[in-house]
Image: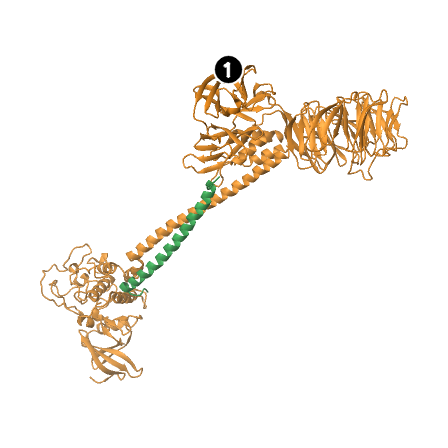
Amino acid sequence: MSDIIASTYEIIKKIGSGGGGVVYLANHLRLNKLVVLKADKRKITVREDLLRREVDILKNLRHTYIPQVHDFFVENKTVYTVIDYIEGESLDKPLKRGERFSQPQVIKWGMQLLEALCYLHNPEHQDPPKGYVHSDIKPANIMCRPNGDICLIDFNIALALGEKNAVGRSPGYASPEHYGLDFSNDSQEDTDGGNTEEDSTEVKDPDPTRTDTVPGGMSFTSKYKTIVPDVRSDIYSLGATLYHLLSGHRPAPNAKQVVPLSEKEFSPPLVRIISKAMAPNPDRRYQTAEEMLRAFRDLWDRDPRITRLKRGCGITAGILAVVLAAGVAVSFTGLKRMQVTESWKKLAEYSENALQEGDVDSAVSYALETFPEKSSPAQPGYIAEGRNALANALGVYDLSDGYKAHGTLELPSAPLYLALSPGGMTLSCVYSSAVAVYDTESLNLLAVLPAADSALAEVVYLGEDTILYAGAEGLTRYDIAEGTARWTGEDATGIRISADGKKAAGIYRNESYVSIYDAESGQLLQQVDLDGRSQSVVANDVFANPNDNLFALNNDGSLLAVSMSDGSLEIFDLNGSGRNMVLLDDTSGYTHFEGGFYQQYFAFSASNAEESVFAVIDTQTMEQTGGFQSASRFSVQTDETGIYVQTENLLVQIDPVSGEQRPLVTTNEAIRSYARSSENTLIATKEGFSFYSPEAEEIAVFEKEDETDFTAIAGQTAVIGSRSTSVLRLLKYEDHQEAEVFSYDPSVSHDEARISADGSRVMLFDWQSFSVYDMEGTRINKVEIPDAAQVYDQQFRRDEKGSYLEVIYNDGTSRLYSAVDGSLMEEVYNAAPDPELYEEFSVNGLRIESPLHGKPTAYDEETGKLVRVLSEEDYLTYVTSVGENFVAQFVTADGYCYGRLLNEKCEVLAELPYLCDVINNVLIFDYSTGDLRQSRIYDTEELIAAAHTVLGEGQ
Amino acid sequence: MTGLTMDEFLFYGGMLCAAAACIGELICLCMFLIRKRRLKIQLEKEYGERK
């Protein structure tokens, strides 16, 4: 053989030989590139297509792990194939040397081979598309390059997919199909049904491309067969090759006799891949190279340890994420509830403020907002503050008789003058050039009438439904019920009506005459000339009315009293008899006048900055019957009941004949304004306003921030107003006689009142004595407690012994007095009690301690944990369980008894003023008017329903 | 009154749970990363470098 082949290739050395021929390493002379020359040993007389088999397969293949064929020629009757020179050695050589390969190395090669097979088997490369089966994958046909990558070589017996050519086989690496064995149904099948012999059999093919002989253990008698291997055969061969590379020994030729790799020595997933690749049944192998390659690639992702790690972490993270979400949700819910609770507490505060200002509807409305219409996790249940506010706003536990807040009226601007109808059913208010008339019960606006543009404009009632007001057109008589004006006279600001209602007097600002009208017809009866004088009027009387003027008519309208700006005061005889009387002339120096007529008497006060004088004049005799003088201003009012004088903090009624003074009101602060009805007196001071009984007893007190300038009281209605605010407060007298269970003489002194268990007896007692009554108010017995100075404590008890008063003495002696008749039931001698007067109550899981010189405190009975201090200043007298709540009774230092309805957290659900007893879940209140009244305990739903009723009525 | 109200208990309790869960997640993440790294080394030792 020449060194130069085809004038192109210079033989460098022989690098191998085999069944197919000799393989040389050569140098391409022109390209100066190493190539492999395969000299096919078969004669050229062999069919060319058989000689070109490998070339025809490789010429169209381009893959990293498959060698490229460059040329094919014949020289000297030898067929040469020029192929890429693959540097390195075939893997059979190190195997023969006994070398073992690492598992990662084998996996890497396996994946590279599979990539090559994927390309090879893919019928899309070349034109027309055709795929190939290598059919002889074994270590000897795998080159390992110096860089560690492999290259699949020797495509001599490769088949196009679908070709039915006989092929050779390499024992151990060849699939069962190569032997004509069909395990697809998991049964061995002889293609010729021949016997088996344990001898090597050479398989001859019509196209002798066999590569090896079949070793012992499996053989066939047929020497000529045609089998159709497919891609799965390559899969088997690859698996067998990897098997050998890992284990170091060739697998058994009989697929069923292959010993699986040890899962202790090699990774179980890898063992399973190779085992599956080498499954005798082709249907159980990987069906494609891609599938097996994917299996290799999934080694990392699908390793059980990775799976376990991911699963474990995923589960843990999932659980923690759920906990996190739950925590956030719970926290958000708690925050939302806290916000709602705070807003409800604010609403409860607004309710209390509104109630203090007399706006009952707003108080109820605010309190109602603290009760959610629908329950939801984000909303807490009702709060104690809300329930307390609603109970207070509704006044359900205030059973005392007296004036209670009824509502407020907001005028378009601050009032200038107020007047109540004689029965208190309507209220007329003068404000900025208008008169508004309201129904005092419904608070509805009945009429708005144009008024004189002056702060001096007045309105007076002729009867319950008729007013005379200073109209814009003049003095006007208006019928409220009909809503019509009856007549209009001349301009007027000041208006007076005679007590008999027949005459009306009108004076306009600083005019120098007074017009006298027939009150019914409006006929101008006469005009009284003031002789050039006029009443005192400020320069701008649109906004200000100093109320310095006296303007009065007597009972029958025969006398008219007018004060003048020059300080004079004169009584005019309207009968024309000329019996005018100048009480004060223009030298008096007085600037402020008040007064009026009572019967035949005229009472007045005249004041300036230094002094004030009061006098009573008998208009029949024209003589002064009484009077006095002071540095403090006197305020004088008269009506059909008498003469009333107020100075500083004292209001008295004065007998015009004797001058005797009957005190009506004595206050702590100076009286700013006052009004009287037939029953009560309304007093306004700097601190607020209060009501007094005819006996001069204060019966109700209200606080008020704005200074009171207007007071009016008539019938069951009282009105409070101020020049600094447009809001008027209305109060109505409430009577709760229907709740009375017992009535007694209010002069009977007692600290406590109790009802016997059977409800037939009432006991009123203090530390000195007690009285027993039947329910009709008849006193059955009165007992003076012996040695009262030694009394330690008193307790009214209702137990198995009956109802009785236990009087406990300092020495431990206890005397039990029957509530039936006051008789001594029993005298018991016990140890001396704790001088600290300590009491303990147990109720609804709470232990309540009540020391004499300490604050009553509630503790949890089980844990002993402090729940709440029940009162900062007052003494706890008794505790009674009422369902899930309880009532605590207190007494203040000055003897005022009251109670509180508390829940399990000792939060106040309701204030119970004047509470004296709780019996069978019924509250008993003791009022200083000599009444015991009862009320049941209202639950939340009842309070809400009552609130809706109140608001519905008010709309 | 001493102690927490139910709403405060929900709020602070929920925050505590959420905080504990966050910390737990962080710990779980750290442990996962550590174990993943160790497993990666072991798998690379068995299967070679991942491609």
In the rendered image, what is the letter of the chain coloured orange?
Answer: A
- Which quarter of the picture shows residue A577? top right
In the image: residue A288, left or right of residue A604: left
Give x and y (percent) for residue A743. 58, 18
- Above or below A256: residue A339: above
Residue identifier under label 1: A821
How packed is label 1: few (under 14 Cα within 10 Å), some, or many (20 or more)? some
Name the one closer to the observer, A178 or A254: A254
- Above or below A154: residue A428: above
Q: In percent of the image, x 45 and y 19: which residue is there? A: A827
Q: Disc count in the image?
A: 1
* Colour convention of the picture: by chain
Disc 1 on helix, strand or loop?
A: loop
Quarter of the figure with the C terminus of chain A: top right
In the image: residue A394, left or right of residue A447: left
Name the one closer to the observer, A752 or A196: A752
Residue type at numbered disc 1: Asp
Q: In percent of the image, x 52 and y 41: which residue is there? A: A340
Q: In percent of the image, x 35 and y 51: which residue is there? A: A316
- Above or below A535: residue A284: below
Chain B: colour as depicted: green
Quarter of the figure with the N terminus of chain A: bottom left
Give x and y (percent) for residue A353. 61, 37
Give x and y (percent) for residue A548. 80, 33
In the image: residue A766, left or right of residue A724: left
Give x and y (percent) for residue A574. 87, 23
Determine the chain carrying the residue at label 1: A
Is residue A388 visible to the viewer in this orientation of the structure?
A: yes
Name the one closer to the observer, A537 or A520: A537
Q: In percent of the image, x 58 and y 38: which residue is there? A: A349
Is residue A920 visible to the viewer in this orientation of the structure?
A: no
In the image: residue A211, left or right of residue A926: left
